[in-house]
Amino acid sequence: MKKVFFVSILISILGLSACIKNEEVLFMGSTVEFDASTYNANAAGLTYPFMTRVPVYGAVSSTANSPALTRLSGDVKLRVNLVGAQRSAETKITYQVVAAESTALAGTHYTALSGTGTIPANSSFGFITVSVLNPGATTGTKDLVLQLTDNESITASVNYAKVGLRIAQN
């Protein structure tokens, strides 16, 4: 009886632990995402981060490695990552200001944005430059929310297409 029990347990162990062939999952598409969105935590109740410091590429923005984002910051470069294989020709990226979530005004708090940018050929990233203007000292902050959009050459990431800039006015 012990022998039958032992053999049945051995057979069930061997039978239930068979090898399963793992299928290799490869991402063959291409998307674009804001670098700052991938490294910084989302703002409370939102699906994207609000940057209160000048974004640092490939790192969390903190007091140790980046200055505060203020009306005196000048040009702020936002890195846009290409997720997928590099391309032999430059890639056009498009973006827009999310007016419903922004309190900053074009021409007052930042220069009007073109809505387009490029990722150079054989590169994994490009930049969008936001020129912060100095309207004079006031209290509070102004928010500028940017969102990458799909175009004919590439799609925007579902999770990392938005980033907010919180510009201190004091």
Image: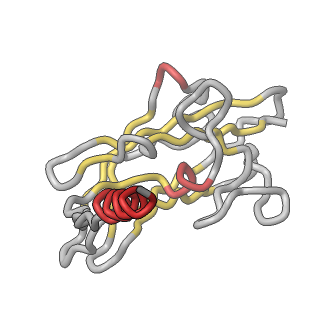
Residue at 78% of width from left, 35% of height from top?
169
Picture quadrant where residue 60 is located: bottom right
Asked whether residue 40 is in view, the answer is yes
**Residue 148 position by quadrant:** top left
- Up the image or down, 115 lies above or below 61; here it is above
Q: Which residue is depicted at the point 27% across and 74% down?
A: 86
Left or right: 140 as drawn, with respect to 146: right
| Residue at x-position 80% and y-position 27% | 140
| Residue 56 in picture, x, y percent from top left | 65, 63
At horizontal 77% and vertical 38% (from top left) the residue drawn is 168
Q: Which quadrant is home to the N terminus?
A: bottom left
Q: Horizontally, is 25 left or right of 78 in the view?
A: left
Locate residue 21 relative to residue 129 in the image: left or right: left
- Closest to the observer, 43 or 67: 43
Q: Quadrant of the C terminus?
A: top right
Percent x, y of residue 149: 31, 41
Let me know if residue 26 appears in the view: no
Instruction: Give the residue at the far front of this rendering.
Output: 1
- Image spot of residue 58 (x, y percent): 59, 66
Pick the front one: 104 or 56: 56
Horizontal and vertical percent position of residue 110:
58, 41
Quarter where residue 138 is shown: top right
